[in-house]
């Protein structure tokens, strides 16, 4: 597909990004022979390699810039490629789905693949097909080597565009850590004097919690309250925000002013993996607990973290304490965080403008 990854050379021919197995395979059209020779098959990795390939499970993303002058795709545009990999049959078959979209959401490529054991080939084979700018393509790649100590997988593949055009390639997936993973691409059969050069690029594991809550990374660190304090939380109080185990939640701890300041409250923000909805639970020093319904909204062009709070154990006398519970609004600008509380769920503020909010509590970041 005519998409050049940011940092790669611009070529005189169309460049295709084909997401397969666990990465994007960069290929051009060429007339090539068999991808795996018959005498090599006896040395190919066996079914046990699926245990190592499980590291691919999850969602991955990569950003780049489209190449100029490529048919069917506007040039010099930012794009995001995403892929999802999961078991079809646990331990023996993986499914792959991928898409590539421009910054305005326009789709320019998509496809699916399956990584499974092939009895005839005696190997693990990734078979894939997709469409790019209206043109269909299909291919396959065979796992030819695995280095478990380095978590490295070597593939050799062949792709066709539905006509006599085809290409052979070799690609290596290297996991120096769980995230990101690197892709080394080597074209092995070129048509003419133009084509992609050996290249390396990177996929990052998608954190679905960060997708649901874009402010998560900006909130991390230790904060101190500079102004806007109250009887409950005075100026100088501290706030410590950390990620939970696995990176799929945030832990917030409020402390009184000073190094030995006592505990004020704690809050946990997490995402339901089934629904992708955010939830929050607040516990005060006196044992009061509140449940929050968070959402990320845009206000005056800025992202704001809005939480509607409910009391877990409301009064039994039927009093309308819920109407007095706050709605919290949080924005971050560099090392400044504004936190505003309004009473009532929505009746006393205009959701379309920040000017309707009271004066905020202003927090300053001390450390990240």
Image (tube, grey):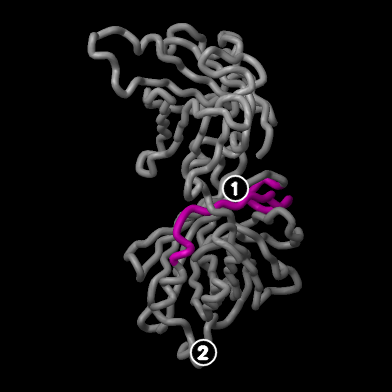
In-front residue for pair 321/54: 321
At 72% across and 69% down in the image, what residue appears? 197
Can residue 109 be seen here? The reply is no
At 45% across and 10% down in the image, what residue appears? 343
Q: Is residue 175 above or below residue 327?
A: below
At 67% across and 26% down in the image, what residue appears? 364
At 53% across and 69% down in the image, what residue appears? 160
Pointer 1 or 2: first along the chain: 2
Helix, strand or loop at disc 1? Answer: strand
Quarter of the figure with the C terminus: top right
Q: Is residue 210 above or below residue 160?
A: above
Which residue, given by chain and number where applicable, does mark 2 sit on? 40
Q: Where does the image place residue 269, in percent across and percent down from the top left?
A: 45, 35
Q: Is residue 208 magenta?
A: no
Can residue 9 be seen here? The reply is yes
Category of crowding for the residue at label 1, using alpha-carbon neighbours closer than 10 angstroms: few (below 14), some (14–19), many (at least 20): some
First to last magenta residue range: 54-75
For residue 218, what is the image quadrant? top right
Quarter of the figure with the N terminus: bottom right
Which residue, given by chain and number where applicable, does mark 1 sit on? 80
In-front residue for pair 327/316: 316
Q: Is residue 64 magenta?
A: yes
Q: Where does the image place residue 153, in percent across and percent down from the top left?
A: 54, 73
In-front residue for pair 127/47: 47
Category of crowding for the residue at label 2, using alpha-carbon neighbours closer than 10 angstroms: few (below 14), some (14–19), many (at least 20): few
Label total for image = 2
Helix, strand or loop at disc 2? Answer: helix
- Please indicate whether residue 93 sits to the left or right of residue 233 in the image: left
Please identify the residue farthest to the bottom as the structure is shown.
39
- Please indicate whether residue 281 sits to the left or right of residue 134 in the image: left
Q: Where does the image place residue 119, in percent across and percent down from the top left?
A: 35, 81
């Amino acid at each position: 597909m005519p998409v050049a990854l940011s940092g790669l050379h611009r070529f005189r021919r169309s460049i295709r990004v084909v997401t397969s197995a666990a990465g994007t395979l960069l290929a051009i059209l060429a007339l090539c022979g068999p991808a795996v020779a018959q005498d090599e098959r006896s040395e190919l990795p066996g079914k046990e390699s699926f245990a190592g390939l499980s590291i691919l499970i999850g969602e991955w993303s990569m950003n780049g810039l489209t190449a100029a002058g490529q048919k069917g795709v506007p040039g010099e545009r930012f794009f995001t490629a995403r892929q999802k990999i999961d078991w079809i049959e646990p331990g023996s078959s993986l499914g792959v789905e991928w898409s590539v979209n421009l910054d305005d959401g326009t789709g320019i490529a998509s496809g699916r693949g399956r990584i499974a054991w092939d009895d005839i080939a005696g190997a693990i084979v990734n078979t894939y097909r997709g469409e790019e700018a209206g043109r269909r393509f299909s291919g396959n790649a065979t796992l030819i080597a695995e280095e478990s100590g380095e978590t490295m997988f070597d593939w050799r593949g062949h792709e066709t565009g539905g006509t006599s055009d085809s290409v052979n390639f070799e690609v290596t997936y290297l996991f120096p850590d769980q995230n990101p993973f690197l892709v080394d691409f080597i074209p092995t059969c070129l048509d003419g004097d133009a084509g992609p050069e050996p290249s390396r690029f990177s996929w990052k594991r998608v954190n679905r919690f960060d997708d649901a809550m874009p402010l998560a990374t900006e909130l991390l660190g230790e904060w101190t309250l500079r102004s806007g304090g109250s009887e409950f939380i005075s100026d100088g109080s501290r706030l410590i925000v950390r990620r939970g185990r696995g990176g799929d939640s945030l832990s917030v701890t409020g402390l009184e002013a000073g190094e030995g300041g006592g505990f004020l409250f704690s809050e946990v923000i997490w995402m339901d993996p089934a629904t992708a909805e955010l939830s929050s639970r607040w516990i005060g020093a006196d044992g009061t607990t509140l449940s929050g319904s968070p959402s990320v909204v845009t206000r005056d062009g800025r992202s704001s973290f809005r939480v509607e709070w409910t009391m877990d154990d409301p009064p039994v006398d039927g009093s309308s304490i819920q109407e007095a519970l706050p709605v919290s609004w949080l924005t971050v600008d560099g090392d400044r965080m504004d936190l505003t509380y309004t009473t009532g769920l929505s009746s006393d503020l205009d959701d379309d403008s920040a000017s309707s909010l009271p004066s905020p509590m202003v927090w300053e970041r001390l450390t990240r």
